[in-house]
Image (cartoon, rainbow, N blue to C red):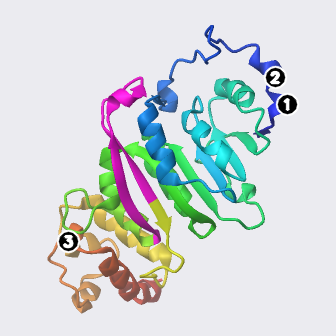
């Protein structure tokens, strides 16, 4: 559902506002809402994004529009995707003077981001992502990697560490491998809890994801690669030999040239791709 500015004026009267005109809206736990209010952090985020006049920006979960305000004057168009219906009228009124502002009341997990592309311009996606859906949302957004220029997200710090982790590091796992398969990952800076209202119980961080124009290590069959990584990290403390038994016979495992006595966390993303390409024909022959 796309709500243009004119659709929000009548609804706006039902919203509770303070005398200063600011939205009186209590953060909702079920939406994972923590509203960013620190001006210095907001400025640092906008500076990291560096919005340009020709950009088609997409903001997920704008909340009360704190980051939106820093982006909207410097881009060709700005689409925001907000799930909370009560925030829609306020956002419509707040940004009604900006013709480049477009609001979509929708669940970002189900939203078709290709539907808002303009003249084949790549999307630049930003957002203070709800912690409770951050991982599935990241996987959803990775499916659009060929249509995206870059992504800047506020996430739980531990999630960012997992996304950027390398083989043999404690935080390394499926999330990091799958994100790094598609994107360059850069942990930009941390954000303490007191920068939000309400303050979360964990530290946050800003991450930049830049999809590759050409995948550095393409899998012959992405579905097999995804299945392999998912299977391997379901029991990450077991050896690769034991986890591969869910996919291959003992005889097939014996044919592999890789050291299967190591744990999955010891294999790099490139090695997982190479292993995927090796077992692909084995799985095909078994079908």
Q: How busy is the neighbourhood of tag 1: few (under 14 within 10 Å), some, or many (20 plus)?
A: few
Residue that appears at 58% across and 15% down: 24
Give SS at disc 3.
helix
User: Residue 53's quadrant in the figure?
Assistant: bottom right
List x then y, in percent, for residue 285: 45, 89
Q: Nearer the viewer, mark 2 or mark 3?
A: 2
The residue that disc 3 covers is 266
Label drawn at residue 9: 2
Contact check, label 2 and label 3, Cβ < 8 Å: no
Q: Nearer the viewer, residue 54 or 58?
A: 54
**Disc number lying in front (1 or 3):** 1
Judging depth in this view, the residue of 287 and 92 nearest the camera is 92
Q: Residues within 10 Å of mark 2 (few under 14, many from 20)?
A: some
* Residue at 63% over, 60% down: 123
Locate residue 113, reporting x and y percent.
Answer: 67, 55
Note whether 142 is above or below 228 in the view shown: above
Residue that badge 1 annotates: 6
The percent position of residue 25, horizontal first and vertical second, equals 57, 18
Magenta highlight range: 182-208
For label 1, the SS is helix
Tag 1 and tag 2, C-beta contact below 8 Å: yes
Residue 93 shown in magenta: no
Q: CA distance from mark 2 to mark 3?
A: 56 Å
User: Which residue is nearer to you in this view: 162 or 12?
Assistant: 12
Which corner quadrant holds the N terminus? top right
Relative to 273, does residue 69 appear above or below in the rendering?
Answer: above
């Amino acid at each position: 559902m796309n709500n243009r500015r004119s659709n929000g004026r009548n609804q706006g009267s039902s919203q509770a506002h303070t005398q200063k005109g600011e939205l009186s809206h209590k953060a909702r736990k079920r939406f994972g809402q923590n509203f960013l209010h620190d001006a210095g952090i907001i400025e640092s985020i906008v500076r990291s994004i560096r919005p340009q006049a020709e950009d088609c920006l997409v903001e997920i979960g704008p909340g009360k529009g704190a980051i939106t305000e820093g982006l909207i004057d410097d881009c060709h168009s700005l689409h925001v995707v907000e799930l909370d219906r009560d925030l829609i009228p306020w956002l419509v009124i707040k940004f009604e003077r900006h013709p480049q502002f477009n609001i979509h009341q929708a669940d970002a997990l189900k939203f078709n981001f290709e539907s808002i592309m303009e003249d084949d311009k790549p999307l630049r996606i930003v957002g203070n992502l709800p912690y409770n859906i951050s991982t599935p949302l990241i996987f959803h957004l990775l499916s659009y990697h060929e249509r995206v220029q870059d992504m800047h997200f506020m996430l739980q710090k531990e999630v960012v560490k997992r996304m950027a982790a390398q083989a043999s590091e404690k935080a390394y796992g499926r999330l990091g491998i799958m994100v790094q398969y598609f994107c360059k990952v850069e942990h930009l800076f941390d954000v303490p809890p007191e920068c939000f209202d309400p303050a979360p119980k964990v530290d946050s961080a800003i991450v930049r994801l830049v999809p590759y124009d050409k995948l550095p290590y393409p899998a012959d069959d992405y579905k097999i690669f995804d299945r392999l990584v998912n299977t391997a990290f379901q029991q990450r403390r077991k050896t690769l030999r034991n986890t591969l038994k869910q996919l291959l016979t003992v005889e097939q495992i014996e044919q592999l040239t890789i050291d299967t006595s190591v744990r999955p966390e010891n294999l790099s993303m490139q090695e997982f791709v190479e292993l995927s390409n090796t077992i692909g024909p084995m799985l095909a022959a078994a079908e």
